[in-house]
Image (cartoon, rainbow, N blue to C red):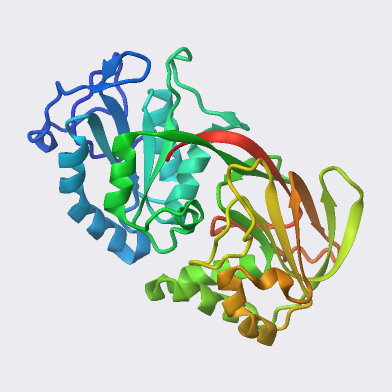
Amino acid sequence: MVYHIAVAVPISMAKPSIFRSQQSMASDLSPDSTIYRPDGNSRRRDLVFVVNPRGANGRTGKEWKKLLPYLRSRLGGECNICESLTSGPCHAIDITREAIREGADAVIAVGGDGTLHEVVNGFFWAGKHVINHDQKAAPSTALGIIPLGTGSDFFRTLGWKNDSHDAIERIAKGLRSWVDVGVISGESGGSHYFINVADVHLSAKAGYYASRYKRFRNLCYVIGALQAFIGHQNQDLRIKIDDGEWEIYPQVTALCIGNAKFFGGGMKITPNADPRSGSFEVVILQDFKWYDFILNLHKLYKGTHLSVKNVSSRSVHCIEVEEIAGSGSIHVQSDGEHLGFLPRKFCILPAAIEMIS
């Protein structure tokens, strides 16, 4: 497997690794600086920054170039900085897995929710956590975020400023906390992971269309939703919650499974979700027409839509969703990434990843 990686500083490793550096980028950094670790060891932290330079129609790459000198000056004395530029879809997954196996202290997703989504999936392989080659090594690899993309919805849930310099200060402090992750399984038997929101039917189809309008920034999600309503038909779904009995939910417009609160560029769709709670919030919209969406759009953004007629919410650990009609056309997505169609099973993995907080 070949990685297209540009790395900022040399890292002393026992074997060839993703951290191998380019000396030309390291002249302004001191390889001898150390930091004090809580376990009593003083050593430099190995940080891998995963950047999608084409994100947000190229804005991510441009903003990253402007940010990099500050990041080097702020973290270069304490950390070994590896700048890893993705070359296409799923490349961030491969980079993350390799970084974890080589013992990185943290993998930092630089961009929007799409990059974060791939990095989160990189923490897992074949249904299990990816582990360091040296299984006795500690601490485990943490997840970090620098928001430079279109959505950055997960950032909103955590209540953090959508500010890259603030994010770098958080990385410098290195404090950690555990967050939950959702896992999706289907007929293929493979597993897919999400950290923000997974959704079914209209909202998933809207996300599918929104990807075509990223040049309009957050407005792309509204445009996508309106386009998705063209030819849309509400569908009866069969749903099983927490290994209970199958129930029929008639005329479902959208079903959203929230590990976090926001999706669609700031829409507070699952307002009671908390990625540290050990459960999902599931919100179901039934029998909505296009004008219901327009009339309640402001409530969807404020998170006050749970009082609207035909909107229901409940806390779950696991939910299975099947289509009754059998058309095979009910869209599924997670963290804004299209995953195909029903049926699917969504389960929570409590405290699955340590995050720099």
Q: Is residue 132 something that shows in the picture? A: yes
Q: Nearer the viewer, residue 147 or 212?
A: 147
For residue 102, side relative to residue 338 (left or right): left
**Quadrant where the C terminus lies?**
top left
Q: Is residue 13 something that shows in the picture? A: no
Splitting the image into 4 quarters, where does residue 103 fall?
Answer: top left
x and y, in percent, of residue 217 in the image: 40, 71
Identify the residue at image location x=58%, y=81%: 226
Splitting the image into 4 quarters, where does residue 12 fall?
Answer: top left
**Quadrant where the N terminus lies?**
top left
Identify the residue at image location x=49%, y=54%: 154
Q: Residue furthest left?
A: 27
Identify the residue at image location x=33%, y=13%: 40
Identify the residue at image location x=83%, y=56%: 239
For residue 311, side relative to residue 122 (left or right): right
x and y, in percent, of residue 198 in the image: 63, 55
Q: Nearer the viewer, residue 341 or 333?
A: 333
x and y, in percent, of residue 332 in the image: 66, 59
For residue 170, side relative to residue 136 (left or right): left
Q: Nearer the viewer, residue 257 or 163?
A: 163
